[in-house]
Amino acid sequence: MSPTPNDMYNKLQNNLYASPITNILLPHYKNSQQFTQVDRACIQDEWQENQSLNGTNAFSDDTYRIVFSDIQQTFNWIQVPQDFGNPEILMIVSSNSDNFARRNLIRKTWMNAEKNKIVGEKQRMKVMFLVGVDAKNEAKNTVILREAEVFGDMIVVDLEDTYVNLTWKSISLLLYGHTKTPPSVKLIGKIDEDVIFYPDQLSNLIKDGTINMTSSSIYGEKWEAGVPVHHKDERSKWYIPKTSYKCRVFPSYLSGPFYLVTRKAAERITVSTKHRKFISVEDVFISGLLAGDVGVEKKSLPYLYMVDEATTDREKFEILAWHTLKNDKQFVESWENMRLTRCAGCQRTTRYFRGSRSQVAEEINQ
């Protein structure tokens, strides 16, 4: 059984070597503020009708527009994969344009068709990277487009990769997921490139009904309503000005590094953007406010560890995804080792095993 948020909270609280980010996140596991009817009314009051605005949509094969009540932008699909197939699940990795090395490691680990049945043998899952490029940096863009051409697994958009732009990028991800894919795609996953992930664990979660791909739902690590808003410290990356969102707390939402959205939910969420002012804190905005506005169910998944200190390589709990601060070498070693010890859905045949230290090191250096 996966540890509950309270279990993880207690573990983190007792960790003498907790990092600064852990100390920031600890209050979120146990919300110190109650979520009241006043808070609910405030969130509803922030919603705007905006009948004069067209919603977020894809204009053409090459262009799309994202619309918030206070700001709208048009973007271009610079390059998209051509060989798609008919998968049920589309996982899109939100990847920084500079991180070629990490993309390559993901291609060799949880994206590898030989090591993940759901990707290879069963072909139920397709994996892509979403990368933004800065129009001012032609040299880097040339390298990115060449990588996209060689591997055929990258969605490239003209959106500069910055933290402030994550909301734009994640809406782009959902829009791509339901407008530029075959009808076979029923589940769209958003995952950060620093998340260790075991795709084959999804098969049983779908089979036992934990994940219902025909519903209007979003799945991940759920944080209950009442997390306080950062209104005061403008230096914080979680800062939100009161002019954008005046309420003191957030509704329930899912952790940003990893969540799964059904196609129906993605359609509803992207249509709803025009009713809210832009907020740069992507997970709260998309999985909390927008999902709540259109009645998308927010559901918890087991085996998720969205804080680095929430688990270790040596534990025996089942694992689906772990948001971790590991470097490239540690990322590969951990993925290979935990595939054998903590992933019930993963293959056990030696044909696919590359778990020894020497073999892992060899793969990293390729």
Image (tube, rainbow, N blue to C red):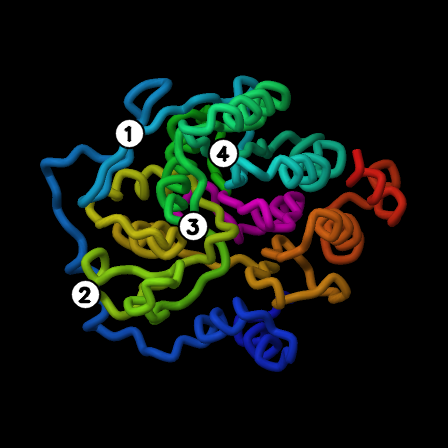
Look at the picture and state if 212 lies above or below 21: above
- Name the one closer to the observer, 20 or 353: 20
User: Residue at point 79% right, 33% down?
Assistant: 366
Label number found at residue 131: 4
Give the mark nearer the N terminus: 1 vs 2. 2
Queried whether the magenta region covers residue 208, the answer comes back as: yes
The quarter holding residue 309 reads bottom right
**Residues in magenta?**
190-217
**Amino acid type for the residue under numbered disc 2:** Cys
Residue 75 location, x and y as percent?
Answer: 33, 28
**Residue hosting label 1:** 74
| Percent of width and height locating residue 103 | 63, 37
Q: Name the residue under label 2.
A: 42
The foreground one among 364 and 117 is: 364
Please identify, in this view, whether the residue under mark 1 or under mark 2 is nearer the observer. Answer: 1
Please say if 237 is above or below 81: below
The amino acid sitting under disc 3 is Ile
Residue 302 is marked as: none
At numbered mark 3, what does the secondary structure look like: helix, strand or loop?
strand
Q: Is residue 163 magenta?
A: no
Q: Which residue is drawn at 47% across and 71% down?
A: 24
Residue under the image location 43 percent in, 65 percent down: 223
Residue 88 at what x, y percent from top left? 53, 33
Q: Distance between the residues labelled 4 and 2?
A: 35 Å
Residue farthest along the left direction in this orientation: 52
Please report whichever mark, 4 or 2, sits nearer to the chain's N-terminal start.
2
What separation in Å lies between label 4 and label 3 (alpha carbons)?
Answer: 23 Å
Cα distance, mark 1 to mark 2?
Answer: 30 Å
Q: In this view, does 212 lie to the left or right of 100?
A: left
